[in-house]
Amino acid sequence: MIGARRLLASAAWLAASLVLGLLLWQGVALWQEHARGVAFPGPIEVCARLGGLLRGEPWLGSSLAGHLAASAGRWGLGFALAVIGGSLWGLAVGGSRLAARLTRPWLEIMQLVPGLAWIPVALLLFGVGPAATVAMITATALPVVALAVAMGVSRIDPHHLAAARMLGAGRLALLATVVLPSLLPHLLTGLRVGMGAAWRVLVAGEMVVGMGGGLGYAILQSRWTLDFEGALAGVLVIAGVGLVLERGLFSTIERLTLARWGGGRDGR
């Protein structure tokens, strides 16, 4: 009963927040039209356009599904490369003092570089196209994941390792009972932060170096056809996908992980 009440209360607050956002949006649209004489699409027009796109209406030579698939493919490839490379680099930095002294400053510097600052490098290496966008995603998310993994490895309690070895634990048992409980909370944090950064730089990268499709490309090109409703509908899709990844995917993984490993860091 208490759980149902909490669920209803959360749903009510979410609905109230949504209504408030729509009212503010409509207010901005009305102000733009009356004070500046500039037509600004309101929520009704944009939602109608979004409904048409969801039904398969063409959008710059493709469909919403086609643009979303193109963006998702680039994001998935770039983020996967960042996770693999960042995990391996983080394990090396966290487990080796030599690797930490030689390469950890590189990660810290890379983390400070905004994703869009990689545009000149990506263009020089890969030219205009999807490969440049993938490279920007990887360069943005990789240091976040690597530093999170390095932090998790460095926080492993050596006494726990020694105790597990004394009890006869092999490598797999050590990994399952000591290493993973310490590493996973840090890794999940890195993945969540890296995911958000990768999704943002994906859209921005498609606007600058993208061609032939993708949400960022479609939003930017919509200005030439004066399809501002379509552009704002694309923004809603970007926000919706990011929300699903953050709240739906990573929050679920984090909840299941904490339930499995007891919710403590450092194996405790």
Image (cartoon, grey):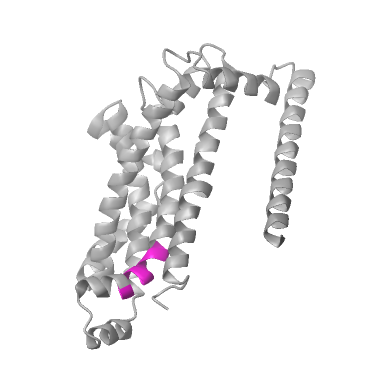
Q: Which quarter of the figure has residue 176?
A: bottom left
**Considering the image in quadrants, where does the N terminus appear?**
bottom right
Q: Residue at (57%, 25%) from the top-left corner?
A: 233
Can residue 119 be seen by looking at this rendering? Answer: no
Q: Which quarter of the figure has residue 214?
A: top left
**Considering the image in quadrants, where does the C terminus appear?**
bottom left
**In this picture, which residue range is highlighted in magenta?**
177-186
Q: Residue at (56%, 19%) from the top-left corner?
A: 230
As for residue 181 lying within the magenta part, the answer is yes
Q: Position of residue 70 (x, y in %)?
A: 37, 27
Decide if residue 179 is on the left or right side of residue 113: left
Q: Position of residue 219 (x, y in %)?
A: 50, 23
Vertical side of 54 occupied by 169: above or below:
below
As for residue 35 lying within the magenta part, the answer is no
Question: What is the residue that sits farthest to the front in this orientation?
Answer: 1
Q: Position of residue 118 (x, y in %)?
A: 35, 40
Can residue 140 be seen by looking at this rendering? Answer: yes
Q: How many marks?
A: 0
